[in-house]
Image (tube, rainbow, N blue to C red):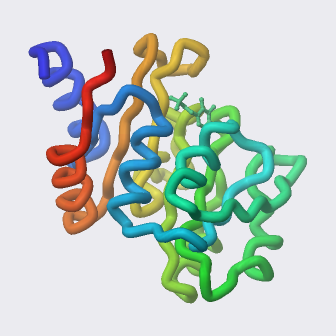
Amino acid sequence: MTDSLLYFNEKLNQYFNSHPVFLFSKGRVGLYAVLKSLGIQPGDEIILPGYTCLVVPSAFLVLGAKPIYIDIDPSTYNIAIDLIESRITPKTKVIIIQHTYGIPCEFHEIQQLAKKYGLTIIEDCCHAFGSEIHNHRCGRLGDAAFLSGQWNKPFSTGLGGMLVVNHTELAKRVQSLVDKELIPPS
Ligand SMILES: *Cc1c(COP(=O)(O)O)cnc(C)c1O
């Protein structure tokens, strides 16, 4: 990494309270990396809001996982929380919560569902760098979070993606995947 990237990475680690932040070429690559590190298998189901970016399901269709779209709440643009539980099956592994337009998604009930069914929460923070809810910073509400630095996002690095991992064990697995498989973009 260049000095400026190292500096950027260090600032991000500080901002997310020293939790490891991994840098990628795009947000979707961070999502793919964390899902692969979680051991997502063909046939696994991933719950996500129906109103999202096309590349979000693409990042796990390549792993053979199945998107389970949940409608959004028109008053928040975020996933309709009361519709989630009925769509959970024994194959469900992950819930993706997206803070659409930077409006934080209510997370308490989703955390309870994740606990009850043993699911991983991944936040899509592509619109939400700097958003907070009930004094909690977006990016720290789930097990991991991905952000995009694309030119059309509120926080832009031109292109680029970031992955915040809130568990030491998972972070180790992401690190070893990065060490083994990451090819820097041309
Ligand atoms: C832009 C965007 C992404 C993807 O980010 P990339 O860096 O282009 O991979 C994912 N989710 C949402 C909500 C987005 O707006």
Q: Nearer the viewer, residue 79 or 40?
A: 40
Q: x, y percentage for residue 35? A: 43, 58
Q: How many marks?
A: 0
Q: x, y percentage for residue 103? A: 67, 40
Q: x, y percentage for residue 14? A: 22, 37
Q: Nearer the viewer, residue 128 or 150?
A: 150
On the rendering, which quadrant does ligand 1 occupy? top right
Left or right: 136 as drawn, with respect to 177: right
* Quadrant housing residue 143: bottom left
On screen, 25 above or below 170? above
Quarter holding the N terminus is: top left
Say which residue appears at 49% left-offset and 84% top-offset: 118
Q: Nearer the viewer, residue 118 or 81?
A: 118
Q: Residue lying at the far right in this picture: please name it.
A: 74
Left or right: 71 as drawn, with respect to 46: right
Say which residue appears at 17% left-offset and 13% top-offset: 4
Say which residue appears at 52% left-offset and 44% top-offset: 132
Say which residue appears at 63% left-offset and 35% top-offset: 102
Left or right: 147 as drawn, with respect to 101: left
On screen, 109 above or below 69? below
On screen, 114 above or below 132? below
Q: Nearer the viewer, residue 41 or 76?
A: 41
Q: x, y percentage for residue 15? A: 29, 37
Quarter holding the C terminus is: top left
